[in-house]
Image: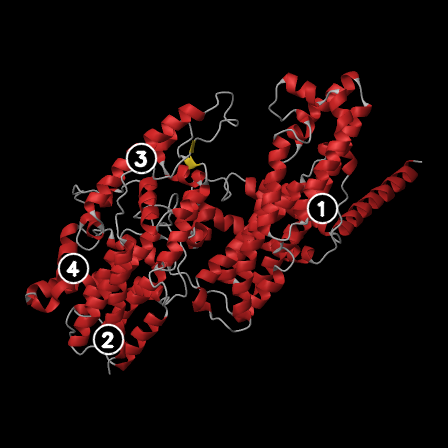
């Protein structure tokens, strides 16, 4: 008998083991099972005390931005790389995940957390592959995109948002690669194919998600209607436990009368939701979504919808923005794929310009004096001073002239934070308003430093005098290309900077031309640089005016940029009652209001700061009317006072969310002594004269 039991036990053990392996094998034939297994492993690796996501230093950030592989990242990569084949294999497996929608709002989706974890891991593995195994990059990109597609299949708002987040990770990586010229035609075609299923709004299953959310709400209300007493109270508590509402409001929302009225209200809510889904364009969809949210908040669909309906406008805004961003990227990739554009056309000059600007900002005032003296008259200086300046300019060449030259050969200039996230000097915070932007100080000083190097008399190459980064004529033409870049950003401050770059370039090129240092190749290079300027708006003043007009219409943007207002009970800016009033403002008036909103930066204040900002290469004070700058400061004080007055008049003390926006009934210039810091018509006229000088040099034979 003991032998029989023993044999039976062995047999049973074998059966159990075989069933376990069979189950595991079956799981590996289904992507959902594989994702659960791999997600658990990556979650374990991520939560390890020494993982890049836990250690105190910026291990992951340094790797993604600069390629730094520290001990923590090295250990993580050694554990993660062996899982890559399984991740890639899961991409092609069928995906089956049953959801019990009868649970209503109690339905849990823990696998979405694992999707996010794997998506983060795949981003790191994609960067790793780009550096060490480029052929595998597109496969990893496809695996990440498939994760997003499959997350969206759950058909809930949270799953759509997770899919959006995953798709944005891949898009961000491609945008960074594009800006660095790392995507050629072949890789562009692979990237287009890999991301085809996650780049459009419909891929997010927003329509399914909104309908399922609506069905879940109806299910919950039906269930509560059928319950009574403690059971009903328990279900209501389960449903509203995370909400901040008083007992009275909850009791009214779930009264028998409210529950009886719910079906008809829910049908009306569904019709409004359908209008969003059927909207023909982004503007219409956003308007319908905002209308729905306002109506729900106002109680037009009853107390239950006011309490429980999601903020649809946020989801709609994110979904359309997501699609618009992907459309822009895919247009660039298609241009590379079909050969109509080259990688250099999409390279972002911002990285190079920011590095050069930062280097220029390190120059002491006395160093700026010496360099500016060379720029203004190199041949008139004693040889001893020229030799000293030459030594300094040779030292600065890698950090300034070489960076500017590389940037000038890039196809475009974009100062978006995500495009610069790999730089320590990446701008953060307010860079939309003002006469001087965070992306600006130092750039004109850097260009002048490069022009000074070009204007030094040529000397034979030797150990003491290495070969320059480029001929003098090419450095001077680069200054024109840089001005053209800054004229495209849609920023008034950059347009003003571009105008002074053009003047400095024209001055330098006239000297080089008089000295016979411009040949046919140099004139052709200058002509090509001039051809890149917009003939109708070479400084980009019109585009900048329109952009700043739209920003001024948004009081919330102004609020985020205007610190003194923040003390005024979080209502820091005055919105005009009729936004159309901004359309009536001239470009000079817009510039004045922009300056008032941002305040006068240190670099433009009359008093000397004894800092690099006031050195002769970088000082921007001569660009502006000093008396007008003082009026800007006075107007800013007046606007703050006006904001406080209007807030006290219009604010409702009942709650933060109900507080009315303080509004100004008249012009936004009401009570202000308007004095534009720069006369824009004159600015454009002077720029046209400088461009004419440059064209004359380019055309001379």
User: What is the quadrant of residue 215 in the picture?
Assistant: top right
- Label 2 residue SS: helix
Residue 468 visible in rendering: no
Q: Residues within 10 Å of mark 3 (few under 14, many from 20)?
A: few
The numbered disc on residue 208 is 1
The x, y position of residue 221, in whole percent, is: 76, 29
Q: Relative to residue 151, is residue 672 depicted above or below?
A: above
Q: Are marks 2 and 1 in contact (CB under 8 Å)?
A: no
For the residues labelled 1 and 4, the Cα–Cα distance comes to: 64 Å
Q: Do the residues labelled 2 and 3 touch (CB within 8 Å)?
A: no
The x, y position of residue 162, in whole percent, is: 61, 45
Q: Relative to residue 370, is residue 641 depicted above or below?
A: above
Q: How crowded is mark 1: few (under 14 residues within 10 Å), some or many (20 or more)?
A: some
Which comes before the other along the chain, label 2 or label 1? 1
Which comes before the other along the chain, label 2 or label 4? 4
Which comes before the other along the chain, label 1 or label 3? 1
Which comes before the other along the chain, label 1 or label 4? 1
The numbered disc on residue 697 is 2
Name the residue rendered at 69%, 18% in the picture.
251
The numbered disc on residue 590 is none
Q: Mark 4 points at which residue?
A: 371
Asked whether, in this view, residue 507 is left or right of residue 196, the answer is left
Q: How crowded is mark 4: few (under 14 residues within 10 Å), some or many (20 or more)?
A: many
Asked whether, in this view, residue 485 is left or right of residue 1, the answer is left
**Image quarter hosting the C terminus:** bottom left
For the residues labelled 1 and 3, the Cα–Cα distance comes to: 52 Å
């Amino acid at each position: 008998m003991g032998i029989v039991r023993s044999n039976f036990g062995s047999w049973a053990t074998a059966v159990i083991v075989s069933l376990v392996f069979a189950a595991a094998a079956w799981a590996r034939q289904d992507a959902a099972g594989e994702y659960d297994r791999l997600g658990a492993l990556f979650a374990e690796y991520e939560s390890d005390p020494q993982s890049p996501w836990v250690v105190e230093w910026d291990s992951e950030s340094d790797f993604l931005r600069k390629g730094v592989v520290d001990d923590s990242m090295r250990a993580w990569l050694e554990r993660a790389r062996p899982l890559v084949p399984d991740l890639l294999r899961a991409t092609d497996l069928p995906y089956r995940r049953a959801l019990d929608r009868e649970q209503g709002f109690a339905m849990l989706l823990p696998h979405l957390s694992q999707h996010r974890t794997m998506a983060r891991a795949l981003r790191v593995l994609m960067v790793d592959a780009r550096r060490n195994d480029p052929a595998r990059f597109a496969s990893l990109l496809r695996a990440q995109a498939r994760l997003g597609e499959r997350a969206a299949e759950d058909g809930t708002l949270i799953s759509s948002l997770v899919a959006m987040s995953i798709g944005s990770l891949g898009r961000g990586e491609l945008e960074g690669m594009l800006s660095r010229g790392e995507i050629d035609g072949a890789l562009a075609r692979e990237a287009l194919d890999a991301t085809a299923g996650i780049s459009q709004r419909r891929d997010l299953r927003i329509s399914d998600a909104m309908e399922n959310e609506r069905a879940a709400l109806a299910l919950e209300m039906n269930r509560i209607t059928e319950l009574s007493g403690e059971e009903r109270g328990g279900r209501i508590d389960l449903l509203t436990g995370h909400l901040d509402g008083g007992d009275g409001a909850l009791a009214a929302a779930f009264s028998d009368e409210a529950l009886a009225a719910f079906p008809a209200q829910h049908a009306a809510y569904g019709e409004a939701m359908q209008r969003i889904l059927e909207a023909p364009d982004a503007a219409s969809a956003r308007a319908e979504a905002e209308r729905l949210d306002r109506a729900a908040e106002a109680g037009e669909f009853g107390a239950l919808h006011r309490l429980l309906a999601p903020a649809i406008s946020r989801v709609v805004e994110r979904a359309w923005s997501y699609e618009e961003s992907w459309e822009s990227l895919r247009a660039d990739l298609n241009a590379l794929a079909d050969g109509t554009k080259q990688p250099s056309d999409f390279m972002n000059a911002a990285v190079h310009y920011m590095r050069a600007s930062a280097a220029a900002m390190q120059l002491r005032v006395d160093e700026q004096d010496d360099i500016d003296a060379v720029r203004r008259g190199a041949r008139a200086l004693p040889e001893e001073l020229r030799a000293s300046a030459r030594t300094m300019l040779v030292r600065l060449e890698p950090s300034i002239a070489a960076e500017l030259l590389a940037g000038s050969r890039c196809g475009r200039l974009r100062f978006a934070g995500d495009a610069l996230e790999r730089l320590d000097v990446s701008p953060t915070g307010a860079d939309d308003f003002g006469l001087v932007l965070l992306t600006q100080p130092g750039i004109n000083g850097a260009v002048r430093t490069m022009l000074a190097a070009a204007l030094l008399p040529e000397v034979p190459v030797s150990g003491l005098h290495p070969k320059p980064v480029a001929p003098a004529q090419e450095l001077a033409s680069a200054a024109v290309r840089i001005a053209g870049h800054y004229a495209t950003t849609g920023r008034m401050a950059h347009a003003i900077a571009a105008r002074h770059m053009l003047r400095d370039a024209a001055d330098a090129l006239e000297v080089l031309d008089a000295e016979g240092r411009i040949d046919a190749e140099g004139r052709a290079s200058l002509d090509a640089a001039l051809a890149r300027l917009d003939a109708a708006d070479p400084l980009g003043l019109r585009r900048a005016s329109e952009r700043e007009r739209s920003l001024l219409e948004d009081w919330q943007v102004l609020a985020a940029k205007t610190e003194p207002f923040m003390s005024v009970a979080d209502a820091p800016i005055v919105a005009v009652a009729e936004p159309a009033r901004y359309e009536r403002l001239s470009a000079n008036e817009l510039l004045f209001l922009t300056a008032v909103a941002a305040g006068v930066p240190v670099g433009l204040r009359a008093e000397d700061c004894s800092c690099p900002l006031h050195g002769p290469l970088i000082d921007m004070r001569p660009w502006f009317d000093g008396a007008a700058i003082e009026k800007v400061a006075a107007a800013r004080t007046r606007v703050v006072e006006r904001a406080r007055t209007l807030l006290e008049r219009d604010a409702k003390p009942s709650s933060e969310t109900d507080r009315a926006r303080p509004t100004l009934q008249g012009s936004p210039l009401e009570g202000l002594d308007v004095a534009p810091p720069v006369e824009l018509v004159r600015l454009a006229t002077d720029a046209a004269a400088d461009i004419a000088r440059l064209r004359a040099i380019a055309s001379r034979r």
